Amino acid sequence: QVQLVESGGGLVQAGGSLRLSCAPSTRTFSTYSMGWFRQAPGKEREFVAAITWTYGDRFYADSVKGRFTISRDNVQNTVYLQMNSLKPEDTAVYYCATKSGSYGYIDNSRDYDHWGQGTQVTVSS
């Protein structure tokens, strides 16, 4: 079973930056895309960004466009989320996930197969 390991969360002041990393603990043979989602207390899990593994097409939620950048390292099998100009409303637990095929929608958490344990990001005002 694929397990995903996230790192890079923490506490940062508004306007600051963080970079999240996510790598599978075992080699994956069928990954169509990898994505980042987040969940704030009392709120639904929401899409943040995703990248297709083969062509590197990138997708972003409107709330993070221009501030967050998703990237991948095909050799290290790792996906990154560079978060700049962070705002208090970005505070949440961030999860990475893999999607094994092109079915469904890239921003729909239900279409993702494997999830990490989450990493806390806290942005103070």
Image: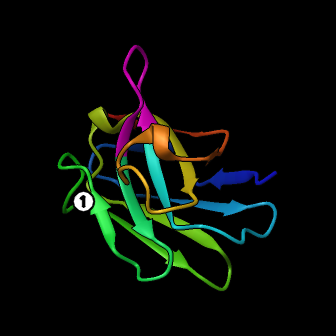
Where 107 sits versus 79, above or below? above
Locate residue 103, reporting x and y percent. Answer: 43, 55
Where 125 sits versus 82, above or below? above
Residue lying furthest front in this view? 103
Instruction: Identify the residue at horizontal 45%, vertical 40% (top origin).
Output: 109
Instruction: Identify the residue at horizontal 66%, vertical 86% (top origin).
Output: 75
Q: How many labels does the image show?
A: 1
Instruction: Identify the residue at horizontal 52%, vertical 67% (top origin).
Output: 32
Judge whether residue 117 can be spotted in this image: yes
Residue 67 magenta-drawn? no
Locate residue 100, reporting x and y percent. Answer: 58, 60
Q: Quadrant of residue 92?
A: top left
Instruction: Identify the residue at horizontal 33%, vertical 38% (top origin).
Output: 90
Question: As drawn, is 32 to the left or to the right of 14?
Answer: right
Question: As drawn, is 62 to the left or to the right of 54?
Answer: left
Locate residue 61, reporting x and y percent. Answer: 25, 50
Question: As drawn, is 107 to the left or to the right of 35?
Answer: left
Where 123 sits versus 64, above or below? above
Residue 43 magenta-drawn? yes
Label 1: which residue? 67
* SS class, disc 1: loop
Q: What's the residue type where badge 1 is placed? A: Arg
